[in-house]
Image (tube, rainbow, N blue to C red):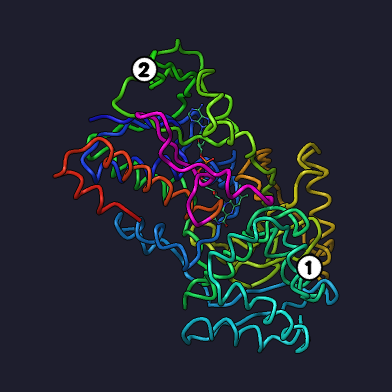
Amino acid sequence: MRVAIAGGGLAGLACAKYLCDGGVVPHVIEREDVLGGLVAAWRDEEGDWVETGLHAFFGAYPNMLQLMAELGISDRLQWKQHTLIFNQPEKPGVLSRFDVPDIPAPFNVIVAILRNNDMLTWGQKLRFALGLLPAVVRGQEYVESTDRYTLSEWLRRQGIDERVNTDIFIAASKALTFINPDEVSAMVTLTALNRFLQERYGSKIAFLDGAPPERLCQPIVDHIVQRGGKVETGVSLRRIEINPDGSVKHFVVGGKGEPDRILTADAYVCAVPVDILKLLLPDQWREMPFFQQLMGLEGVPVINIQIWFDRKLTNVDHLLFSRSPVLSVYADMSNTCREYADPQRSMLELVVAPAAEWIGRSDADIFAVTMAELAKLFPDQIPEPAKVRKYHVVKTPRSVYKAVPGTQSLRPPQVTPIANFFLSGSYTKQPYLGSMEGAVLSGKLTAAAICRHFFSAHSLGQATALKA
Ligand SMILES: Cc1cc2nc3c(=O)[nH]c(=O)nc-3n(C[C@H](O)[C@H](O)[C@H](O)COP(=O)(O)OP(=O)(O)OC[C@H]3O[C@@H](n4cnc5c(N)ncnc54)[C@H](O)[C@@H]3O)c2cc1C
């Protein structure tokens, strides 16, 4: 049995990996010359890695951690101290930490919040805790019901102090979804918070020890190829051709400057971003309610900027929440990532979010506004004496799905009404939002669904073992 998969991001690659494990031969085609999609990276003319995005892994990523363990590459995650670190705009250059003690959840997170006196008063903490009570007591069912509200609306309804929003939730919302609390669905932030409250090491952060295409995607490709699968880069899905009964006849695919060719398989997976999937849908499928609701989903803009300095700006070996209006999270990758290590000079990697206002602007404008914000975070070093050696800006006009209220019910399952057509991608329905964990889990769920759908009772056993 053969399965054609369009899209070589984490979802498509994970799907192929788990299909191989279920005894199915996958054939992945990826439009770009490099694998990884939103985790893709490439080298500049000096050999330094340019990344699509700064990526943090969490302890609450069971499927990603399991995937890496299965590939024998768990040691490539560099786990950091269990703490969350915030900048304080009112005290430039001073950091505030939520140190999470090594005790069972949720007490570890509660103690971390109670011990931090830089950001919230006791009264604000108390009102915050009371406001969160329904989510803690009534669990995920309650959390899902909050998809009606923006986070700002929900905080107001719960009587939670505005200061909690400005101190914590703006930073959390921008980091998780690249949009602000007045746009993001309350459900998204509450889902992440609930997970952190349930798992002892859920909020512990790790960085990959190098660039994702080499350190994460390549081992998945090796696993696939060793088991007879195929992974092609620089090849796009151009059209989905269908049979009279509406099922997929074949994929029409092609490389740059090459004639189109036909890719035939027993099942077909689209692991491309939802915005591209919408363009690829055959006319006959467009009117079906299942595909109609995809029209309500779209990718959110985000920008990644890397800046190389001539000296060390900080020794902090962790992710930081900037709490800047322009920037979201950042890290000094010369400290956090083994392959980028430099004891003398910093390389800051920063996420610009929300990016709607900046996505159409020049790289020079984006660099200038980032430097103005960095002058507040490193007042002793920027603009003087630190000198910038070089910078790279990577714009992604449509990245993960925009998690505004009402979108949860629009996210499709991996199984579609078309018998031989499946979806993968972090935008599809799974409990981990638009994240690397969500992408891996979606691919795994797709693989399990395909095996269930096509295999005999014997193989069904194997497929069930793939279930998340
Ligand atoms: C700046 C940034 C920071 C992030 N930070 C984090 C983080 O810290 N932690 C975290 O967990 N997540 C983070 N994410 C989110 C995470 O990267 C994504 O959720 C995940 O990588 C999505 O994987 P995917 O496979 O679903 O989609 P994608 O990565 O978008 O993969 C889709 C693939 O399909 C390919 N494709 C498109 N069209 C075609 C076609 N016609 N034919 C063939 N192939 C095609 C694309 O080139 C792409 O490779 C971040 C994302 C960004 C952009």
Q: Quadrant of residue 149?
A: bottom right
Q: Is 360 placed left or right of 102 in the picture?
A: right
Question: In x, y percent, where is residue 344?
Answer: 62, 65
**Residue 259 appearing in the image:** yes
Whole-number angstrom distance, CA of label 2 to CA of label 1? 56 Å
Residue at screen point 47% across, 59% down: 209
Residue at screen point 43% across, 35% down: 416
Question: In x, y percent, where is residue 444?
Answer: 36, 48
Q: Would you say residue 431 sits in the magenta stretch?
A: yes
Q: Would you say residue 385 sits in the magenta stretch?
A: no
> 299 and 412: which one is in front?
412
Dominant SS in magenta: loop
For residue 377, the mark is: 1
- Callout 1: 10 Å neighbours few (<14), some, many (20+)? many
Type of residue at label 1? Leu
Q: Is residue 125 above or below residue 78?
A: below
Magenta span of residues: 404-432
Residue at screen point 79% across, 54% down: 370
Question: In x, y percent, where is residue 53?
Answer: 60, 49
Quadrant location, ligand no. 1: top right
Q: Which residue is mark 2?
A: 249
Query: Which quadrant would the C terminus be assigned to in this image?
Result: bottom left
Q: Is 366 placed left or right of 312 in the picture?
A: right
Question: In x, y percent, where is residue 165?
Answer: 77, 69
